[in-house]
Image (cartoon, grey):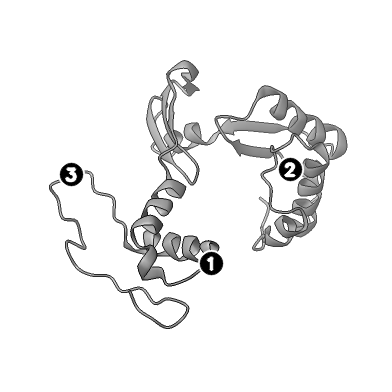
Amino acid sequence: MLNCPNLDLTYYQGEHNGKYPTEGKDNDYFEGMFKYIFEQLKAKPTEYKIFIIDSLFTTDKERDALAKILFEKYCVSQIHIEPQSVIALYSTAKQSGIIVDSGEIYTSIVPIYEGQVIANAVITSPIAGRELTKQFMKYHKADLDSNNVCAQYEMSRQIKEKAIEILLDPNDEGKRGKEKINFLLPDGNII
């Protein structure tokens, strides 16, 4: 078992403008990313099996490119690539079910039967974290007191993450109920 120190990809993202690895299908990016990870972990790739959790929207061509790099450049003995929705379902000790995955850019509803994603039944929506942040920012723009849109967005994101509670029952007031939550802005004001 590999004992991993804290792996900080912040430096790597900064060096490569923080783009998503599959954006632009840049094989040099994949190679550099794996090189950086193996160096940071002080791991010899030939000694480990590689398990990759990827997006539902990763194409076979992109998976093949990853596999080719890992096998040919780093000589790994085995790799396994699995969609994140399937892994989420496995964490419940089930092989069939429906996973609702809401991230920054999209929300997807993924039906899985016996460990296989039913691809033609996957539903996606652009209503996700980014859209919620934008809506919050739109309604509280005056409270945010900043001419910098990036700062307004970041403050909105932080407030959203601190204040929003998801309830399964719309009649439930939740833990917070109608309590007010204060948020300290960078300029010292509280909203």
Location of residue 75 with respect to 186 vertically, above or below:
above
Where does label 2 land, which residue? Answer: 48
Amino acid of disc 3: Asp
Q: Earlier in the sequence, mark 3 or mark 1?
A: 1
> Which numbered marker is on residue 148?
1
Amino acid of disc 2: Tyr
Location of residue 175 with respect to 76 vertically, above or below:
below
Badge 3 vs badge 1, beta-carbon distance below 8 Å: no
Dot in front, 1 or 2: 1
x 64%, y 38%: residue: 52
Dot in front, 2 or 3: 3
User: Left of 72 or right of it: where is 54?
Assistant: left
Label 2 element class: loop
Location of residue 155 with respect to 44 vertically, above or below:
below
Q: Can residue 93 be spotted in the picture?
A: no
Location of residue 17 with respect to 31 vertically, above or below:
below
x 77%, y 46%: residue: 34
